[in-house]
Image (cartoon, rainbow, N blue to C red):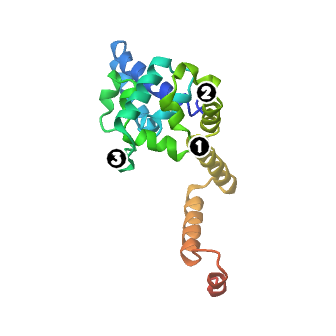
Amino acid sequence: ISCPNASDAPVNDLFLFQQLKQFAVVNKTISEAAVKKFQNHLWYLSPELVPLALFSNKLKTEEKKKMISNMKFHGENWSERLIKLKNIESLEKKSLDMLVTSVSASALRSMKVDIDFLFNNDPATWNDSPEYQEGKNLVYSLKVVNDAAERSVALMSMFNESITRNESEMQRLIQVVEDHRKRVPDARKCTLKSYSPR
């Protein structure tokens, strides 16, 4: 239910990953399979998205202070972008503040979040300020991309099944669509005028 909440996602993902790793004590096979599957879905633990957790109620004030301190220390620099984590195994012993890099502050600034306010005020008082509430509303309004992608895939699958259930007919249909896309790459007037059906 809480997975669309972008501010809680870094906290939830790190906690779940650590729980899956700890489950190896109970059943190593299940733990390894779950970790292998889950590691493809850890994009919220990238340095660009970890600072969203500053707006989470699940993150303690002390952890927020550490994240802010690390962001101040690293400064801002987009040249060190990391979309995927390099060493997944090291996550077991990490906290969110350890995942902050020079990109983290830049990412918040690019979203128009007032990071100067975050840097200059105690996290214990953030909830009372309009600057923090504005940033929180912005983060809460972020759409989780995966939900939309999954809905699109489901919708396309349902559409495909409504046309035909026969696999060979489906393959022919896909070939026709592919051929049409090659011959009509866009919907400009000059392209459509030159199009001649076979």
Q: Calculate the distance from the C-alpha at mark 2 to the C-alpha at mark 3.
A: 30 Å
Q: What is the secondary structure assignment of the residue under circle 3?
A: helix
Q: Which residue is mark 1?
A: 150
Residue at the image position 62 percent from the left and 39 percent from the top: 138
Picture coordinates of residue 67, whole percent (x, y) = 42, 28
**Which of label 2 and label 1 is nearer to you?**
2
Task: Locate the C terminus by quadrant.
Answer: bottom right
Say whether residue 152 is visible: yes
Residue at the image position 60 percent from the left and 74 percent from the top: 186
Q: Which residue is mark 2?
A: 2
Q: Calculate the distance from the C-alpha at mark 2 to the C-alpha at mark 1.
A: 16 Å
Q: Looking at numbered disc 3 in the image, what kind of residue is underneath it?
A: Glu
Q: Calculate the distance from the C-alpha at mark 1 to the C-alpha at mark 3.
A: 30 Å
Q: Residues within 10 Å of mark 1 (few under 14, many from 20)?
A: few
Rendered view: 3 above or below 109: above
Say whether residue 34 is visible: no
